[in-house]
């Protein structure tokens, strides 16, 4: 197995966005290799504290080692960040000074062949963020109806040939269960006309869609963003890194709604809706990686960073 590695994307932008302070309490919802968390603890020394979650045992182990010098100032929970309420309750924490959510897949998960996230090498069809989870990419590919496969490939992958890919998956599995990424890759390639295969790997969108489905990446995302923003102290910041348009759209819409005050008809003499502005949006347009970072880390290409502050 390769060593767990994950370059923190837009590190300086995230640290600046969090407006770190000594003694602050910060939540890292997807700790990965601990790159962002390390800098949070380093820059809030000696009194800053970190609460973090991740579903991947390898990530938790790697992050624990990386953060060892800050022993006593952090706790990592094996949990989905969407279950933040239970985690914060167990930790005995109510309010936070900052929240960081990084929705990217780690370099380790992509590069470790046995995890089955990548279409670059043949591997078991897996794609589970939590290796102990019962449901995998193999289950999606082999048990979903043609209609359901087409729907998720279209919705989560924004793939124009979703119906053709789904039909060919169903046709192929009639001959035997599809168990390898290489098999799925060949089916996708055969489903997309050659003239449309020049703009990057044609498997990327379908693999992304299946990964999102396996890990329910979009389910509960809106509630989690809204809930975590409400856990901030006044002046606290939430920074969210997204890597595809569906996530970014959800974050943008939640921020916009939370930043909106009274929505009553202006003709009414008094507010009856009771809606109050909860956050100030710091990034009217999302921040993206610099040319220098793009040259050093190609996986930062799709990253968008949105920041908001509790009012």
Image (tube, helix red, strand yellow):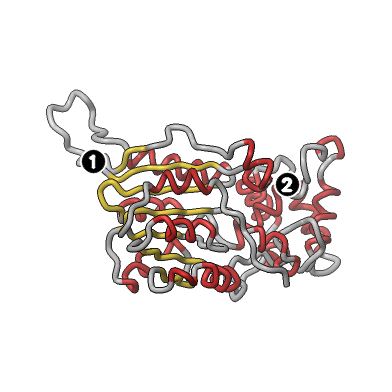
Q: Quadrant of the N terminus?
A: bottom right
Q: Determine crowd level at label 2: few under 14, some 14-19, many 20+ residues with C-alpha closer than 10 A.
A: some
Label 1 element class:
loop
Nearest the viewer among 270 and 108 is 108
Q: Position of residue 59 (x, y in %)?
A: 57, 68
Front residue (pair 83, 295): 295
Which residue corresponds to the image point at 40% horizontal and 65% vertical from the top-left? 51
Q: Which mark is residue 276?
A: 1
Provide residue 205's location: percent of width, then percent of height: 70, 47
Q: Residue at x 34, y 51 (%)?
A: 229
Q: Position of residue 144 (x, y in %)?
A: 67, 62
Considering the numbered disc 2 on the image, is that residue within a helix, a strand or a loop? Answer: helix
Above or below, 291 against 98 in this view is: above
Task: Decide: is 104 above or below 272.
Answer: below
Tell me the quadrant of the picture where the C terminus can be found: top left
- The answer to whether marks 1 and 2 mark residues whose Cβ atoms lie closer than 8 Å is no
């Amino acid at each position: 197995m390769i060593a767990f590695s994950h370059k923190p994307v837009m590190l300086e932008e995230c640290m600046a966005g969090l407006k770190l302070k000594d003694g602050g309490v910060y939540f890292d919802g997807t700790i990965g290799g601990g790159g962002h968390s390390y800098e949070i603890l380093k820059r809030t020394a000696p009194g800053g504290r970190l609460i973090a979650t991740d579903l991947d045992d390898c990530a938790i182990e790697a992050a624990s080692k990386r953060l060892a010098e800050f022993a006593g100032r952090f706790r990592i929970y094996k949990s989905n960040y969407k279950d933040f309420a239970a985690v914060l309750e167990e930790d005995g924490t109510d309010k936070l000074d900052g929240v960081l959510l990084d929705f990217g897949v780690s370099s380790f998960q992509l590069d470790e062949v046995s995890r089955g996230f990548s279409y670059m090498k043949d591997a078991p069809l897996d794609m589970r963020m939590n290796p102990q989870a019962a449901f995998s990419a193999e289950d999606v590919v082999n048990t979903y109806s043609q209609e359901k496969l087409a729907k998720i490939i279209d919705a989560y992958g924004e793939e124009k040939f979703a119906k053709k890919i789904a039909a060919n998956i169903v046709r192929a599995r009639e001959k035997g269960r599809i168990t390898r990424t290489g098999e799925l890759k060949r089916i996708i390639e055969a489903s997309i006309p050659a003239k449309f295969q020049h703009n990057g790997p044609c498997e990327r969108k379908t693999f992304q869609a299946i990964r999102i489905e396996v890990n329910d990446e979009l389910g509960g995302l809106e509630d989690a963003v809204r809930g975590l923003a409400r856990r901030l102290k006044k002046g606290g910041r939430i920074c969210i890194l997204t890597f595809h348009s569906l996530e970014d759209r959800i974050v943008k819409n939640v921020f916009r709604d939370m930043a909106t005050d009274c929505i009553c008809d202006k003709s009414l003499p008094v507010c009856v809706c009771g809606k109050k502005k909860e956050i100030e949006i710091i990034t009217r347009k999302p921040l993206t990686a610099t040319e220098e970072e793009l040259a050093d880390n190609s996986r930062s290409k799709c990253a968008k960073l949105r920041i908001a502050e509790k009012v």
